[in-house]
Image (spheres, rainbow, N blue to C red):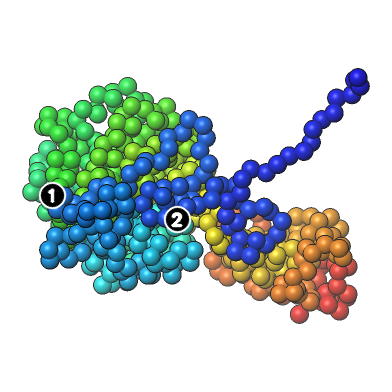
Amino acid sequence: MSNLNITDRTYSLPPLGNNPSSQAQGTSPGSFSPLPKIASGRAGRWTFASADTPGMPVPSDKTAWDFMPLDWVLKPGFEDNYEQAAAWEAPTGFQPITQLESARLGVVTPEMKRVAEREPHLTAEQVRDEVASGRMIIPANKVHLGYKLDPMCIGRAGKTKINANMGASPVSSGTEEEIEKLHWAEKWGADTVMDLSTGGTIDECRQAIIQNSTVPIGTVPIYSMIIARRLEDLDDASILQMLRHQARQGVDYFTIHAGVLFEHLQYVKERLIGIVSRGGSLLAKWMILHKQQNPMYVLWDDICDIMREYDVSFSIGDGLRPGGLADATDRAQLAELCTLGELTERAWRKGLQVMVEGPGHVPFDQIEFNMKLQRRLCHGAPFYVLGPLVTDIFPGYDHITSCIGATAAGFHGASMLCYVTPKEHLGLPKKDDVKQGCIAYKIAAHAADVALGVPGTRDRDDELTKARAALNWEKHFELAFDPEFARLLHDEDLDVDTDFCAMCGHDWCSVRISKEIVEFASGKTADYAWDHAKQTAALSPEQLAVLEKRGVLSPDEIHKLASKTKKAVGAEASKADCHSDYVDGEQARLR
């Protein structure tokens, strides 16, 4: 027997899911996530799901089809095949108001058609079936549809969405600044916006945001309910009046913290940071003062009736979400989540569209469990999560600590990610904070979609890779999410577009070397070829301001980038101050 140990170096890939590249470009085998099963009812509960780690909760075997209005009749013969419009008879004279009601009747609404246009991997009929199953919502108040709203969807069958929060506070901002932040958030990719105003002219600010917004607008109505009123004076009439008022204004979804029950408060006593949800803490205090149950829970059916009139969607609030890692996945949080499942069922019976809100601050290892427990308890209703933050010690950088958790959340089950900005825990976000939060969360959402194998989500990545391989800087920046910022960082070191960048220089540029190897396809795509080095355009005032803020270059160097003369870049001898042996001397001259 030989005493040589032979190492087995064979391997096999895990089962493959969808390829996120429409044309299967490159050499990657594709997504390692399970193949999606886009289908009506229970059969679609695995749609764009990560593979379950052993011990994770399995999806619910129920959908919104199991929670039909009590006055709808299941037709004989459909007992085992009831997840379709043909199986149900609505009351005589029934007219659908909500997207869910239309879907239950088999109707494809104009909003569903628009969603399918924006989600090209889905048909309008698939959108309808996802809405009917309760796994997708189209937050589109009928009033807001009369303004500028462009319908979109939130659900696992669609791409992962992001939300941006804004709103005036008692000490900062106002209507004009919030409208500016709204448009800024839309520019940087926010799919929905929540107006969380707690000060200033709240009603005017909300109305202006709705009338100027192309994206759905959400609110937390309890904030307005207690303006000019003591918390203890909050009563049923004032609650319902404010909900009706905001529905009439055109709010697309309400965060209602109805899952915080009186009996849950005992589980909060030993938490390190108590209740961090504003709505949750207000209602907890109200319950303790009155020794009564949460009025939002008690009034749930009445709230549903008001929201149905305008097709306002629910974003059922997580008032007991953890505010620190030490309180994550505790009894208070999970007791509330069980109640959120009950409220989801009750809202579906009323014909309402529902998504459910989630944590918060969660250690990385607990994120998958949190996502998949909600998927089970709430029967696949879209999960809308804040972050979660995966560490608590980086104030000022929580857009980063949270987008790490958000990527995992998006991969494991969340349908929408609520952004966190650098100002989280510190103050009201300003314009640049909104941009930083949006970009961090677009990264998280996009990374999750690519990992899940959502068709076409890697196409732009592939095109940018080809531009990068060809050293085509102009196309490289054009395909970047933030072209201006990418360009200014490039020009900070080298303001000539040539066949290398300043990171490696010419002789050490692996991309240039790969391009020159005849046998490699790298960099040889005809559409991305370029024929000469060229001086870049002068930077814009906005780009120069960013450079000044970065503090890397001297004022004189920044001035040179603003003027972009041949003298400024050391090219008085008619050739750029850079070396290239990829193109001849004439081609390397500045044009």
What residue did someone put label 1 on?
302
Q: Amino acid at mark 2?
A: Ile
Q: Amino acid at mark 1?
A: Asp
Could you say where residue 330 lies in the image, as x and y percent from the top left? 36, 27
Residue 541: tell me if it is visible. yes
In this picture, residue 156 sits left or right of residue 348: right
Could you say where residue 562 lies in the image, as x and y percent from the top left? 64, 70
In this picture, residue 575 sits left or right of residue 552: right
Residue shown at 18% from the left, 60% from the top: 90
Could you say where residue 345 lies in the image, as x and y percent from the top left? 25, 44
Residue shown at 12% from the left, 66% from the top: 93
Closer-to-camera residue (541/351): 351
What residue did someone put label 2 on?
38
| Disc 1 crowd, CA 10 A, few/some/many (<14, 14-19, 20+) | few
Q: Quadrant of the C terminus?
A: bottom right
Closer-to-camera residue (435/266): 266
The quadrant in which residue 107 appears is: bottom left
